[in-house]
Image: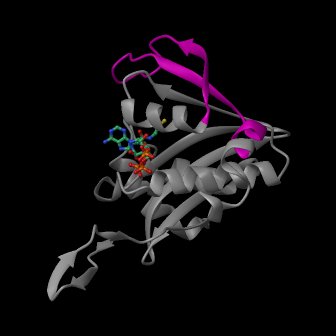
Amino acid sequence: MGSSSHKVVNGTIELDRPVIESAVICRLSPSCVKDVAEIEAESNTPPWTEQLFSYEFNNRCSRVYGARVAGRIVGFLVCHVIEDEAHIMNFGLRRDERGRGYGRELIQYVLRDLHEDSVHWVTLEVRKGNAVARRLYDSLGFLEVGLRERYYRDNQEDALVLKLNLQQFINQFGSDSAAT
Ligand SMILES: CC(C)(COP(=O)(O)OP(=O)(O)OC[C@H]1O[C@@H](n2cnc3c(N)ncnc32)[C@H](O)[C@@H]1OP(=O)(O)O)[C@@H](O)C(=O)NCCC(=O)NCCS
């Protein structure tokens, strides 16, 4: 959530840019399933159901991460980890919290966490037309390694397969979230 700050210069009040709180990122527990499904409903088509998320919470290879701001869950990311590879299965931010840096904070935290657990590669699929997500992944160093034609059943849109070398990400962004 944003709030305003101000300073007084020569007796006049100057408003600064809104102060955006940092998100607190952590692994979520099954009790968060309703919040996650609510965010999913405004993020992806067709949305995963609560039942599907419950399955993910109980799947041993699955990790569900969340970003909280002022105690409210504003975003989630689900990934599967198998040996030294991870696949991002789902990722979404509340519509009214997008564009504030929380998506970047969340995925960067996850990438560092995976690197600490000796994961070397991260893959994902993204809609060809999802310019916002593609720009984010591109800025993190994901490379296009494949195309799945008409992958999305709702509109037959193609999926791009992206892959990230986690060591290269760490070399560029550091292993400490306070650094970026
Ligand atoms: C994609 C998504 C997770 C990004 O989260 P977010 O909190 O909105 O993104 P951030 O504010 O952290 O911005 C991260 C980057 O995304 C890109 N971005 C964000 N908003 C953008 C916009 N309006 N236009 C273009 N690029 C944008 C930028 O590269 C930005 O980095 P920068 O601010 O350093 O330039 C979020 O928009 C979302 O939930 N979208 C719907 C679901 C979705 O597409 N999920 C991904 C499926 S693969």
Q: Residue at x 85, y 47 (%)?
A: 118
Q: Which quadrant of the figure contains the C terminus?
A: bottom right
Left or right for 98, reference 24: left
In the rendered image, residue 115, in percent from the top left (x then y), is placed at: 78, 48
Which of the pair 22/14 is nearer the observer?
14
Q: Residue at x 52, y 67 (%)?
A: 32
Query: Is residue 52 visible to us here?
Result: yes
In the figure, 55 relative to 136: above or below? below
The single residue placed furthest to the top in the displayed view is: 149
In the rendered image, residue 168 lying in the magenta stretch gets the answer yes
Query: Is residue 1 visible to us here?
Result: no
Q: Magenta stretch? A: 141-170
In the rendered image, residue 79, in percent from the top left (x then y), is placed at: 64, 45
View quadrant of ligand 1: top left
Q: Residue at x 35, y 49 (%)?
A: 41
In the rendered image, residue 142, in percent from the top left (x then y), is placed at: 61, 30
Q: Which quadrant of the figure contains the N terminus?
A: bottom left
In the rendered image, residue 28, in percent from the top left (x then y), is placed at: 60, 65
In the figure, 108 relative to 144: above or below? below
**Number of disc labels:** 0
